[in-house]
Structures are given as C-alpha cells and as structure tokens.
Amino acid sequence: MKTYIVGNWKMNFTVGESSIYLHKLLKRIKPAKGMQIVVAPSPVALQPLSLQTDRKKIRISAQNCWGRDFGAYTGETAIAQLKGIVDYCIIGHSERRHIFGETDKMTKEKVAACIRNGITPILCIGETESERTFGETADVLRDQIVAGLSDVSKEDLKKVIIAYEPVWAISSVKGAKLASPDDIAQSVELIRKYLKSTYGKEAEEIPILFGGSVNPSNAGAYLTIPGVNGLLIGGASLIADQFNDIIEVAKRVRA
Ligand code: 13P
C-alpha cells in the first residue's frame, strides 16, 4: 500500500503565497516509489496550483465540497466542478463538523459525490476530548465510518482514504495534547475492524492516515504504528521546510 503524506493548508496563504510554496516544494521533492504527496490549498488556489504542479511529484486536494453536482447552493463548490483540477478531497474534517455543523448526512453525500466524479475522498473521523473522557471513542469512530461510507459499494471502497484525527490532538484546538502511538494503534485497529465487519477482506486495502500535531520529530514514530498508511498534516505543512522534512522522514521509515 502507498504511503500518503497530505498537507492540509486550511484557510491560509493567498494565491500568490500558495504558488511560491508549491514552487519551492516541487524543486525540493524527489519522488519516491510508493509515496504519494498531496497538498490541500484554499479553494481559490486550487486551479492555479493544479496547472502549476507536476502530478508525478505532488497531487492537489480540495478541503471540502458539496454533495450535489450542480444547482441552487449559493457559495458552495460541487466536486463535479473540480474534476480535472483535484485528485483528492478532504471530507468531514473536524473543523467542518464542529465549526460549520456538518452532519453525517452531508458527509455521506460528499463522499458519494467524490466517488461519482472520480475524486478520492479523504474521510476524516475522530473523537473529541469529552467523547474520549466518557469512553465513547469506539462508538464515535464506528458511527462516523458507518455514516460516511453508507453510500459506498464494496467495489468503490478501494477509492476511499480514511484519516483518523482525534480532535483533541489537533494543534489549533485549545489545550491540544499529543496522541500516543498506543492511543492511535488502538483506534486504527478499531477502524480496521469496523471496516472489515462491514466490507470484508476489501477493507484491508483502505489506507488509514493519522493526523494531529504531526511534525518532523514525531512523524517517524507515527508512521511506524501498525496499520498507519500515512499522515494528514495541518500546522507543520504550512512551512515548506518542515513538510519536506516529514516527507524525508517518511522515505527513511518506508525504505
Ligand atoms: P495539525 O497538524 O495542525 O494538528 O492539524 C491536523 C489537521 O487538522 C489536518 O487536517
């Protein structure tokens, strides 16, 4: 299975800054076999960056989309409109769920829209601090997987990526804590178990990424957790040197 290193730039960088960043990264990155590097810029930078990138080195992801292909949805972008521009789309990020009130129904529709349009959804799941404290992690992960993938057929399952991002470990969340490899291993095992119980053997092919305060110093430890197939990086992906260092760590770990 490939190793995915995905940088989620969130709502940062102007179009010009995004372009300079990509230019720097393209110059520095040496493609490695079995590794997929992806960046997810703001919506305004998607098209220029898709024209600028070398897809053999770096693929482009959207950070969100709407679940319908066209229509009266003011302010939204259909993934159908991003065909040919992006290869991936982050869906159900905790910031979408908790700041913008995205529901499981919306998440399910967005995942289905991505698959219908040939774009790989990166479905984010993860428990909050209080859900963890009350011992609800397993239920939350199961519910988010079941809901998010409920319109995905067995045949389409290999087109999906799951990103486990415990909300309490995301660097921008107040009082964020580092997730321990044991915490992550347990959750990743649960995720794989739910996927297998719903889809059977096909579930083994779904990449599971980890995200939450990943940086060049802890990336190696996170990537060696059994069942972790890559990283979804926020803060550290905003600094080209750090993102590139994480890519170098990944290359060493996977060599
Ligand atoms: P940080 O790496 O800043 O914790 O962000 C994680 C994240 O939300 C990526 O989607």
Image: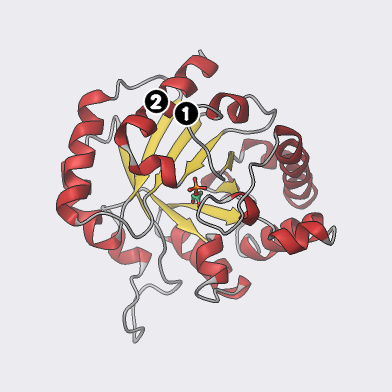
The amino acid beneath tag 2 is Asp
Front position in the image: 213 or 61: 213
- According to the image, label 2 marks what residue? 245
- Numbered disc 2: secondary structure: helix
Q: Residue placed farthest to the top in the image?
A: 255
Q: In this view, does 211 lie above or below 252?
A: below
Residue at image position (51%, 29%) is 2
On screen, residue 134 versus residue 255, left or right, reads right
Name the foreground residue: 107 vs 71. Answer: 107
Give x and y (percent) for residue 19.
18, 45
Tell me the amino acid under the disc marked 1: Pro
| Residue closest to the eye, 180 or 121 | 180
Residue at 59% over, 41% down: 210
Q: Does the residue labelled 1 lie within 8 Å of ligand 1?
A: no
Colouring method of the image: secondary structure
Q: Nearer the viewer, residue 119 or 165?
A: 165
Q: In this view, does 120 lie to the left or right of 46?
A: right
Q: Is residue 5 above or below residue 97?
A: above
Determine whether label 2 and label 1 are within 8 Å by CB: yes
Residue topped by disc 1: 216
Locate residue 202 relative to residue 87 in the image: left or right: right
- Which image quadrant: the N terminus? top right
Whether 217 is drawn above or below 133: the answer is above
Count residues near mark 2 (Cα–Cα under 10 Å), then give few for <14, some for 14-19, many for 20+.
Answer: some
